Image: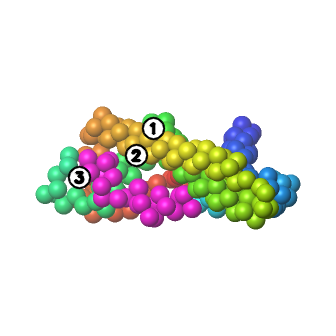
């Protein structure tokens, strides 16, 4: 019963998050009357928010390769501690990191913390993208509805404020990622024997596929 309630609550939070992210790009068009505000709230906000979040995840996971990039601090630390002369490639370091992190049942709080941090990095980036789109839509809508006697000054003032907001959101996301990397490295150093044991298994026995429970994946 409690698990079902918790799951339902998390789904509601996810929908609310998508709605909040998806509303932002349409604000300029809704304010200027280019689109119906009710349509934005009821129809397009949630799918827009979902697409923005997936765009942010694509940038993080595929373009930036934040999880398995050879220069990820946690992977660099594992390679340096284990020793490059022992055949620890970036791919092997990633397997060591993943297997060690997910095999310990008593590390659930650490995993939850790491997942929350990555989630906020994605969310803040999605909010940045949404704000940039809001600026573009607001400027376009103002030009489209402006008559010869209208002034663009209010639009530029709001656009400048939105641009500063977008910059702050991006900086916050990058700072969260920096703190996450620091936590990752500190956790590895504090529990190095566990990582070393997995490294011996992965590299010396040829085990290459991390066994990650589906419910633990982010």
Chief SS of the magenta region: helix
Calculate the distance from the C-alpha at mark 3 to the C-alpha at mark 1: 21 Å
Residue at the limit of the structure toward the front, as seen here: 149
Q: Write the residue at 17% across / 56% down.
A: 84
Q: Write the residue at 79% across / 52% down.
A: 31
Q: Which mark is residue 137?
A: none
Q: Write the residue at 30% across / 34% down.
A: 190
Q: Which residue is mark 1?
A: 110
Residue 23 placement (x, y as % from top left): 73, 52
* In the foreground, 18 or 75: 18
74 on left or right of 168: left
Q: Residue 190, can we see it?
A: yes
The stretch in magenta equals: 55-79
Calculate the distance from the C-alpha at mark 2 to the C-alpha at mark 3: 16 Å
Q: Which residue is mark 2?
A: 101
Looking at the image, tell me whether mark 2 or mark 3 is earlier in sequence order: 3
Residue 69 placement (x, y as % from top left): 35, 59
Residue 213 placement (x, y as % from top left): 51, 53
Looking at the image, tell me whether mark 3 or mark 1 is earlier in sequence order: 3
* In the foreground, 141 or 53: 141
In terms of secondary structure, where does tag 2 sit? Answer: helix
In terms of secondary structure, where does tag 1 sit? Answer: helix
Q: Which residue is mark 3?
A: 79
Calculate the distance from the C-alpha at mark 2 to the C-alpha at mark 1: 9 Å
Q: Write the residue at 45% across / 38% down.
A: 110
Indicate the colouring scheme: rainbow
In terms of secondary structure, where does tag 3 sit? Answer: helix
Quarter assignment of residue 6: top right
**Which one is closest to the eye, mark 2 or mark 3?**
3
Quarter assignment of residue 188: top left
Q: Quick check: marks 2 and 1 in contact, CB under 8 Å?
A: yes
């Amino acid at each position: 019963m409690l698990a079902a309630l918790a799951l339902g609550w998390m789904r509601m939070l996810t929908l609310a998050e998508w709605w909040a992210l998806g509303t932002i790009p349409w604000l300029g068009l809704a304010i200027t009357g280019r689109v119906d505000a009710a349509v934005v709230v009821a129809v397009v906000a949630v799918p827009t928010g979902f697409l923005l979040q997936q765009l942010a995840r694509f940038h993080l996971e595929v373009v930036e390769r934040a999880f398995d990039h050879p220069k990820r601090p946690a992977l660099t630390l594992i390679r340096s501690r284990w020793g490059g002369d022992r055949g620890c490639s970036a791919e092997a370091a990633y397997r060591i990191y993943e297997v060690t992190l997910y095999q310990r049942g008593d590390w659930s709080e650490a995993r939850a913390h790491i997942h929350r941090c990555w989630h906020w990095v994605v969310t803040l980036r999605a909010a940045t993208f949404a704000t940039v789109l809001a600026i573009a839509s607001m400027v376009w809508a103002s030009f489209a509805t402006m008559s010869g006697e209208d002034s663009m000054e209010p639009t530029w003032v709001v656009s400048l404020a939105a641009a500063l907001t977008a910059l702050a959101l991006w900086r916050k996301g990058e700072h969260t990622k920096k703190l996450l990397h620091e936590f990752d490295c500190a956790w590895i150093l504090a529990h190095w024997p566990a990582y070393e044991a997995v490294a011996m298994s992965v590299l010396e026995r040829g085990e290459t596929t991390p066994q990650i429970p589906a419910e633990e994946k982010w």
